[in-house]
Image (tube, rainbow, N blue to C red):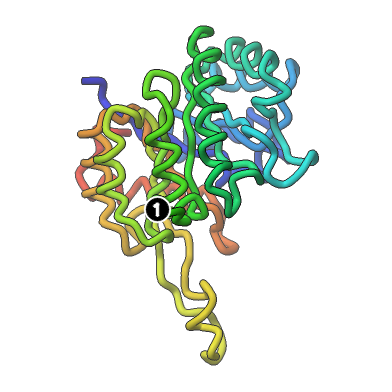
Amino acid sequence: MTQAKIALNMSMVKFIMWEHGPDVTFRQVKDAGISYFELSQVEMTDEFIDRVLEASEKYGVTVISTSVNYKPLFGANSKGLDLEKDLDKIIYFNQKLGVKYVRDSLIPKTCIHNEKGYFEAAADLNHYGKILLDEGIKLYYHNHHFEFEKFNGKTGFEILVENTDPAYVGFEPDVHWIQRAGHDPVKWIQKLSGREDLVHLKDYRIYFPDGEPSPDIFRKEQCIQFAEIGEGNLDMKAIINAAIDGGAIYLPIEQDDTYGLDPFDCVRKSIENIRKMGFENLL
């Protein structure tokens, strides 16, 4: 069995990448104790990828995956490439990077509150997954919480899982969003065993907001925060063990918001806690 490795998702450090580029970003990634990186939310160009490859070799940080949209959820101005219109570019840029995994991180608008849309998306993911696999690239789908809306007793996420071919489509479970959807992350990791080379580690913290409590506290997600690994309420040790048992190869850390803290301080806190949990060998 391949030893799983801790990685970092770019969402935590996207502003550093946008402002300073790959060299500065990868140097700080390596200094924080991480050697594997998920690239996302960037405009893929030959010039940018050349800079990524140069920084990767210079600092020993390997890009393990890139992100695509199946169809843009937020319109034509979304960053990145779309499977629907940029398939040739996706294949070219990922082969140039030497990347094996492409992750679709957002459902299209056609799936929002629409059972039929999930079946259509599953068929399309199978279609694109087969094309990518023939080019040596694996297509993975990354969940949020809105895929867990139920339609006739099944969630949208279940529809995607049950109607995609494991040979063509894998899944990158995000444990924070599974928790926020009211499901058990460990059970989903177990259910996806064999289809989850990538598992997103993201903790789930309850933090009472500043100021006096108001009735909104019972109706809105004011108390929920993203958290450094080990600083929230999830059983991260059980999650990591389940991911390893399920065949995960990379475990990217992700924290969508660091609430004003330096993101690399948050990365270092996550790494420190992962070591304390006994997973030094994953670094």
Where is 175 relative to 100, above or below?
A: below
Instruction: Say which of 85 and 39 sits in front.
Output: 85
* Residue 33 in sight in this render: no
In the displayed structure image, the side of residue 156 where residue 245 appears, left or right: left
**Residue at x 55% of width, y 90% of height:** 214
In the displayed structure image, the side of residue 101 where residue 97 appears, left or right: right
Where is 120 relative to 100, above or below?
A: below
Instruction: Say which of 98 and 117 sits in front.
Output: 117
Report which quarter residue 192 is drawn in.
top left
Where is 245 relative to 139, above or below?
A: below
**Residue at x 59% of width, y 16% of height:** 94
**Residue at x 20% of width, y 44% of height:** 278
Task: Residue 172 in the image: state x and y as whole percent.
Answer: 42, 36
Task: Residue 49 in the image: state x and y as whole percent.
Answer: 67, 19
Number of numbered discs overlaid on the protein picture: 1
Residue extending farthest to the front is 152
Instruction: Say which of 185 and 200 sits in front.
Output: 185
Residue extending farthest to the right is 77
**Residue at x 73% of width, y 30% of height:** 43
Q: Residues within 10 Å of mark 1 (few under 14, many from 20)?
A: many
Query: Which residue type carries mark 1?
Result: Ile
Residue beneath disc 1: 178
* Residue 149 in sight in this render: yes
Instruction: Say which of 7 and 243 sits in front.
Output: 243
Report which quarter residue 183 is drawn in.
bottom left
Q: Secondary structure at mark 1?
A: helix
Where is 194 relative to 46, above or below?
A: below
Report which quarter residue 235 is drawn in.
bottom left
